[in-house]
Image: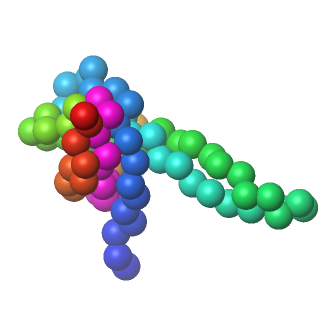
Amino acid sequence: MPKKEKYGRVVSTKAAKTAVVEVLEYKPHDKYNKIITETKKYMANDENSICKKGDEVRIVESRPVSKNKCWKVAEVVKEAS
């Protein structure tokens, strides 16, 4: 089974070796079929602290690192300006 991956924006890097990534998901409403934007925050393991606030990153599913972290930062797609 392939690992899931998501793209998002780094919201916080205050915790050590952790980046909080905000991911936007678009899905249609069940009844009205209007496209709704949902935001979800994921805590991702950032071992080398390469992320900065505002970076666009790709996160990949991994084994649980702590209670809330089961994602890791794979790469920085676009750096914050």
Location of residue 62 by image quarter: bottom left
Magenta includes 21? no
Left or right: 48 in relation to 59: left
Q: Farthest residue toward the front?
A: 81
User: In this orientation, does residue 69 appear?
Assistant: no
Q: Farthest residue toward the right?
A: 31
Up-down relation of residue 18 to residue 3 (above or below): above
Total labels: the figure holds 0
Residue 73 coordinates in the image, percent (x, y): 24, 49
Left or right: 38 in relation to 32: left
Residue 68 coordinates in the image, percent (x, y): 40, 37
Location of residue 65 by image quarter: top left
Q: Farthest residue toward the top?
A: 14
Magenta extent? 53-62
The residue drawn where x is 25% and y is 34% is: 81
Location of residue 48 by image quarter: top left
The residue drawn where x is 80% and y is 58% is: 34
User: In this orientation, does residue 22 appear?
Assistant: yes
The residue drawn where x is 63% and y is 46% is: 38
Residue 17 coordinates in the image, percent (x, y): 19, 32
How is the structure coloured here? rainbow
Name the magenta segment's main secondary structure: strand
The residue drawn where x is 25% and y is 53% is: 77
Q: Farthest residue toward the left?
A: 48
Residue 40 coordinates in the image, percent (x, y): 53, 42
Magenta includes 57? yes
Quadrant in which the N terminus is drawn:
bottom left
